[in-house]
Every structure is written in C-alpha cells, then in structure tokens.
Image (tube, rainbow, N blue to C red):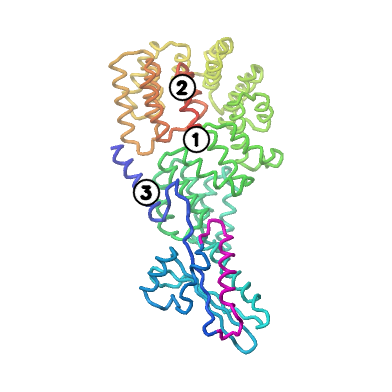
Amino acid sequence: MRVGIAITMLMLVGYIMYDLGFLSPDTELKHEKIAVRFMDFANVTGKEKLADMASHWISNRLEEIPESQVVKYSDANTDPNIQIATAGSNQRRKFAQQTGAANLLEGQIFRESDSLVFDAKIIDLADGSIRQKFGPIKCAIVNPMAGINEITGEIRGWWASRDLKFISVPKYEAYKSYLAARDVWLDDMDLAEQHLRKAIASDPTFIDPYFLLLGHLQNEDRYAERDALLIEIAINFKDMNARQINLLEVASADVAGDLRRTYKKFLNELDIAPEDLFINTEAMVMATYFVNDPLKAIDYFQLIPVDSLNLDNCGYCTTRLRTAVFAYLELDSVGRASELIQYIDEDEYLNIYRKIQVYTASGDTTALRKLIEKALVNEINRSASLWTVVAWQYILSGNDEGLEMALEMAQSERINHSTYTKAEVSYLLGGYSGIEHTIDEWLRDFPTNRYILSYGARVTAQIGNEDKIAHIMYLLDTADEEDVYDYGYYTYYKGVIEAIQGNDVKALDWLELAYSRGHQFSHLYYHNDIDLMPLFDNPRFQKLIHPMSQ
C-alpha cells in the first residue's frame, strides 16, 4: 500500500540523517566551551607570570573565533598547582561544574638550556580522553612570546576547524573519469553513467561521482537504484564535511518529495559556487519547477553570460536556456524570451515546445507555421499534436482568434491524425461526448497507463457522469497505491477532477497534497493548466503556487 511504503521511505531518510548525526533544520551548531590553563611549576623557567601570560593570550585568541565559547581566564586558573588532566575523574567533574567547560586545554612550559619549550593538549573533561596534542614548540628564552604565539597558532587553527572534515585527494583515474562524465553530461548520458561508475570503482572513497550519479538516477526515474545508492553513501561515508552533508540532505529531501526543502538546502551549494555551470543551472531548474520562482531563476541565469556557453557541445547549456526562456515567459518578459530562443536549435521536442510558447506569446503565427512544418518534415513530432500545444497556450492567454486558427490547423485533412491526437483536438473543442466511448475503451484496456488516466480524468470530469467519476477516482487511488514513486501525480488529477466539477475547496485540498508529495510546477500544471483557470484568483491557489512566500 502507498501509505506503508511512504512511511518506509521516510524511515529510510530518517535513518540516514540520524546515522550521520544530522541536526534539525532549525538547530545551529554551538561550539563546546573550553578552558585554558598553562603551568610553570616552581617557576622553572625563571620567567615570572609566563604561564599566566600564555593562558591569557591563548584564551583571548580563541575568543576571536566566531561562536567560540571560552571560560574566563581568571575562572580557569583557580587551583594553579593542580594538573586537572591527570587529577582523576572527580577533579575533572568538579572543574567542569565550576567553569561550565566541556574541554580543557592544559599546557606546560619548561626550560632546556637557553630555550623554552611549550606543549599542550586538549582533553575531554567527561572521560579524560585526549582530543589533540600540540607542540613541543621551542623558542629562545629571551623571547618567550615567540613560543606563546607559535603554539597559539596551532591551537587556534585546530579549534577553529575541528568540526570541519577535510577532503582527501581522489585517485587520478577516478578523478579523470568523474571529469569525463561532466564533459558529456546530457549529451550522452549512457556514457556519462559509465564514467561515473568507473570513477566509483577506481576510488570508492571519492564521494563526488556518487552525488552526480544520484542526480542522474533521479532524472531517469530510476528511483529504486537511486534509493540504494543513497543508502550506500550513508553507510560508506561516515566522516563527511559540511558541504557533503548538505548535498546528502538535498538528496534526502528530494527522495521525500519535499520540494521547498530540497531547493532551500541546495541554495547552500549555490552560495559556495554560484558561477559553476552545473550548480547554477540546477538552482535555476529548482527555482522554476520546484518552487515556481522565475525571478530567482533569472537572477541565477544572469550570473553566467550566455556568450560564455558552448551551445554546440553542452546539453546542460541547452537545458539552461530552455529554463531561462520559460522563466522569462512566466514573468511576461516575451521580448527577452524571444532573444534567447534564437540560441536554441529545433532538433528535439522540448526545444520546439519552448519555441511554440514564445511564438504564441509574441503572436508570431508565421514563425509558428514554419516551425511546425519543419518539425513535420523532420518527423520530430506529429504536426497535429504540436498544434494542440499551440491551442493550449492560446486558451491560457485568452486568445480566441489564435485558438481558432490552431484548432483548424490541427484538424487539417493533410495531417495524419492518431487516435490520441483526435481525442486531444476534440477535448480542446469542447466535444467531450464525442470521445467518451474512446476514453471508456482506453480506461478498460489500459487502466494503469499514466497518460490515459490523466486524460481520462479530464474528459470524465467534463462529462459529469457521477458513476464514471467515482470509477476514475478509484483508478487513480489504485495507481497511487501501486506506484511508490508517483510523487503526487495521481493526487494532482483528483484535484483537476474536483476543479472541473466546481468543487474548489476539495480541488485545492488535493492540489496542496499533490505539491506536498512532490508534484512539480511545469508548463502544463497548476497555473499553466487550462482546467484550473477558475481557481487562478483564489487566495489559496495563489498561496499554493508561491510556496516560498509561506
């Protein structure tokens, strides 16, 4: 059942986050409190107050570290003749209670001929274990501050970075394969995957190819493999740095279908490398399709000049341009979208679709006709189907004249119509009863087909037969239960059915649930869905389509 599997998935994510020591989203790291004590037993150095000077200087330097908590110098140096580190658990406990410290930096100074020697160690006051040793540092006896300053640098550097995990250098072959995968990304994904798996095999401790492979499996809808890889990362990489932990949190949020959290966590990655083409483009995609924030997508897009992109050999660059064009259209910046569309070839359906959006928005029917004629000649897509795309866009914009032209072209006798295209044209013409029998046959023969279920939901709702609506709702429920990774798809169409029926409250209940389960924004959904147009001005709907304003 869907509910049981959903709980299992959330438990999986919870296990990963707990096992890696994740904090809750609202928790901030608080540095453990430290006390500093240096000793110069019996004044063997002959330098008066030297130990006090060292304790005071080091305490002050540690306090300069952001969020560092240091015990007041005078409070830490009570009982100066007792060496806390070796005085036993009772003494450590007493000192911890008096000072509130969890750690103690205890050092000593002694003399060797005409030199001074400094050494120190940080101990955990709870169990007496040594966390880190420093020194020995030697300096001329005539210049003790040189020794104090040198050991202070060691201590301060370690204390400031103790929560950081430093990345080890990967093996040469692994790194070469990883870069090779990036070079062919989106141009040849089979080859990219081969390179990534070779990188992992060459050096299983190199985490970067794991994350790139994780994204690839997600994009390919290979969810079971993605989840297995996510668990493998959690098990094999126990000592990740903050950036790697954040990337795993991004992946975990994505698995859970939490679009807002996925985007918000990914912004940490963008902050680190805003001009990295991979990272920046991913942020654009998330801003557009995860949280419907086209303005942010354009902000990210403008960080990397278009003329710096290698559009001939960079599939990722084409994705970037397509996303930017869509974002500009969402912002009603048709002029800028028209400028960018010139960079995109007409060699695949997604590019053609984006050009259709631009030409319908700009009213360029001549360019539309040429585009669809060329697509028909190149057999990229059925011409009639492309004209139904045009019609959909004209319905959204309220262009009745353009809609009439598009539907006339879609019905043209010279076009080879499939049954699917005829059904689409009939639906856009409002001829629901004329395709009712066809829909009934499809639902009987292919009750789990995604396209048929979604299209059947629209037609059935428009016809209004209560028994058939109940049946399509049942089919959507069944598909939802059987498809572990539907991410709100079937829930969305329950919302569409209710919207067509005029049940706004129920429609919004389903649509909000669909988004919470991971159903993304696109050129067909939510505020771009012709059957949800009666909801467009509803305050709840506006809140739904602007999730970052919540």
- Residue 14: which numbered mark, if any? 3
In this rendering, the answer to whether 448 lies above or below 383 is: below
- At 52% from the left and 49% from the top, the residue drawn is 212
Pick out the residue farthest to the right: 307
SS of the residue under disc 3? helix
Would you call the spot at circle 3 few (<14 residues within 10 Å), some (14-19), or many (20 or more)? some
58 drawn magenta: yes
Give the residue type at disc 2. Pro
SS of the residue under disc 2? helix
Give the residue type at disc 1. Phe
Would you call the spot at circle 2 few (<14 residues within 10 Å), some (14-19), or many (20 or more)? few
SS of the residue under disc 1? helix
Would you call the spot at circle 1 few (<14 residues within 10 Å), some (14-19), or many (20 or more)? many
Between 518 and 447, the one lying in front of the other is: 518
Which residue position holds label 1? 290
Give the residue type at disc 3. Gly
The answer to whether marks 3 and 1 mark residues whose Cβ atoms lie closer than 8 Å is: no
For the record, the magenta segment spans 43-69
